[in-house]
């Protein structure tokens, strides 16, 4: 518990007393008394008020130091961007006298809280509990400094301005609560309920799954004769899609990923939505036995984040911790450098998912980087596009200036389509979608590639 030195401020009661004293002196002056009488009255009134203030300050200081208020702040282990959470604040009064005042919670500016202060009146030996809703609007490490209290003095003439309680910090991650809601995704049928349809693969996987009873249509070559003799009925080996593959994310943190064409203000940038989609696909891949790794690019030298591929239940939490506080930068994204770095570090063949926002002017460098990656890995490019462009292109042609805007938007979309055509000719799977659809599209393409046995 940290407590600062006591600072006394005039209370509302004292301000009222001063106004009344002033009006009293004005009334005396209107009666036209001798000058000495007015001076004496002013001195007596001032001395009495000063004595009361000094007495009040001494008593209040003594009472506070003998039994200060106790603050307990119960914070969640972490916050999620855009998800409302509750911070429980408990003020305990161990003193034998009631305590009245106002409490101010001082947190990071990116944390949305209800308007302060919180009024309290705590009985002797009692407690006051506040459940404060808090919504984080940005990722990173956010601080909760010591709380501020304006405590009414014993006689009510002063307010004690002080801070109590510890300084704490919590991390704000991408919206992992929304990712946790996908825990029920155990099979293809439920993925279909999300709008993710998986193609049926021609043939079967090569990883053994289990022994099952023979059914009409099962390949005869899959009959397990030893198990058949043991159970005296036909038993076949069932196979599943290959597991223990690697899904590696190459996440762009360059200047274009700072785009925010939805203007929601809470986790709505292209980068934030890309991070959500990345976590969703990571969850699906891990649940299917694949390992997951990640690397960022488009940052100043030395600020890249690298997460070596790993499997297991704790991988998603570790990945969130590694990427949760990454922010897009004003730096230009160097695709060729990122591809060379990944090839140098990731030698085992796997699926490389590149998440970026590229334009037609990036075509030459992007194609070179994708060619490098394809020399060893299966490459999947997720290219984000701005929602506002589609809205402009769909405008009715009511005014000449609108026609120019629509023409520019259509030309921009055509150039992006040409970029997609070039990438497809290079043999790279690509999606071109708005950020809000990225999660569903990533999982859909992953399921398709899995079913095809592409990696």
Image (tube, helix red, strand yellow):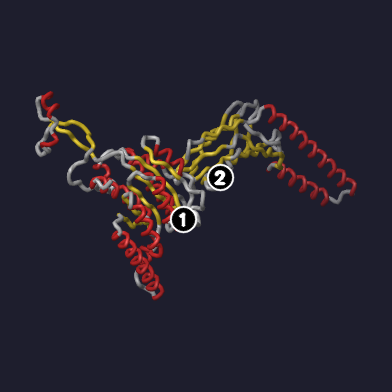
Q: Residue at x 42, y 44 (%)?
A: 175
Q: Is residue 184 visible?
A: no
Seen as rendered, the residue at the extreme top is 230
Label pair 2/1, CB-CB below 8 angstroms: no
Measuring from the top left, give residue 95's x and y in whole percent.
64, 27
The residue at which mark 1 appears reads as 254
Measuring from the top left, give residue 17's x and y in whole percent.
73, 43
Q: Callout 2 environment at 10 Å: few (<14), some (14 to 19), or many (20+)? A: some
Closer to the camera in the image, 173 or 72:
173
Secondary structure beneath dot 2 equals loop
- Exactly how many numbered labels are in the figure? 2
Closer to the camera in the image, 91 or 235:
235
**Mark closest to the chain's N terminus, 2 or 1:** 2
Measuring from the top left, give residue 329's x and y in whole percent.
50, 54
- Answer with the quarter of the image where residue 7 lies: top right
Q: CA distance from mark 2 to mark 1?
A: 26 Å
Is residue 188 left or right of 86 when viewed as pictured? left
Quarter of the figure that contains the N terminus: top right
Secondary structure beneath dot 1 equals loop
The numbered mark at residue 157 is: none
Q: Is residue 19 visible?
A: yes
Closer to the camera in the image, 206 or 436:
206
Q: Residue at x 32, y 64 (%)?
A: 417
Measuring from the top left, give residue 396's x and y in whole percent.
34, 69
The residue at which mark 2 appears reads as 108
Between marks 2 and 1 in the image, the one whose residue lies nearer the viewer: 1
Is residue 200 left or right of 186 when viewed as pictured? left
């Amino acid at each position: 518990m940290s407590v600062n030195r006591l600072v006394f401020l005039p209370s509302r009661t004292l301000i009222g007393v001063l106004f009344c004293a002033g009006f009293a002196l004005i009334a005396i002056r209107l009666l036209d008394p001798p000058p000495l009488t007015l001076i004496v009255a002013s001195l007596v009134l001032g001395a009495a008020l000063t004595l009361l203030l000094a007495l009040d300050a001494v008593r209040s200081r003594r009472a506070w130091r003998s039994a200060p208020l106790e603050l307990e702040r119960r914070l969640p282990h972490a916050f999620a961007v855009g998800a409302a959470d509750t911070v429980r604040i408990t003020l305990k009064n161990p003193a034998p006298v009631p305590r009245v005042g106002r409490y101010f919670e001082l947190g990071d500016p990116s944390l949305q809280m209800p308007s302060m202060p919180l009024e309290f009146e705590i009985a002797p030996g009692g407690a006051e509990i506040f459940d404060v809703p808090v919504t984080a609007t940005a990722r990173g490490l956010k601080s909760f400094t010591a709380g501020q209290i304006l405590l009414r003095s014993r006689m009510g003439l002063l307010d004690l301005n002080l801070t109590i309680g510890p300084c704490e910090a919590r991390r704000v991650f991408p919206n992992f609560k929304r990712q946790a809601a996908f825990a029920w995704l155990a099979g293809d049928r439920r993925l279909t309920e999300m709008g993710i349809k998986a193609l049926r693969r021609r043939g079967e996987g090569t990883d053994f799954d289990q022994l099952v009873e023979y059914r009409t249509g099962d390949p005869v070559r899959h009959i397990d004769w030893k198990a058949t003799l043991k159970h005296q009925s036909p038993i076949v080996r069932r196979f599943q899609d290959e597991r223990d593959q690697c899904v590696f994310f190459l996440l762009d943190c360059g200047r274009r990923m700072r785009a925010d064409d939805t203007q929601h203000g809470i986790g709505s940038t292209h980068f934030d939505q890309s991070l959500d989609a990345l976590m969703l696909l990571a969850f699906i891949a891990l649940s299917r036995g694949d390992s997951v790794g990640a690397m960022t690019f488009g940052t100043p030298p030395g600020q890249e984040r690298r997460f070596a591929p790993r499997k297991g239940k704790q991988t998603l939490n570790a990945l969130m911790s590694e990427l949760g506080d990454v922010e897009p930068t004003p730096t230009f994204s160097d695709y060729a450098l990122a591809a060379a770095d990944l090839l140098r570090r990731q030698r085992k063949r796997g699926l490389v998912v590149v998440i970026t926002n590229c334009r037609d002017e990036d075509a030459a460098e992007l194609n070179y980087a994708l060619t490098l990656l394809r020399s060893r890995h299966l490459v999947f490019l997720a290219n984000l596009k701005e929602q506002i462009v589609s809205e402009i292109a769909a405008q009715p042609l009511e005014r000449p200036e609108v026609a120019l805007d629509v023409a520019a938007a259509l030309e921009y979309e055509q150039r992006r389509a040409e970029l997609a055509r070039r990438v497809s000719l290079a043999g790279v799977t690509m999606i071109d979608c708005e950020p809000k659809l990225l999660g569903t599209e990533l999982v859909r393409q992953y399921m398709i590639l899995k079913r095809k046995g592409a990696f």
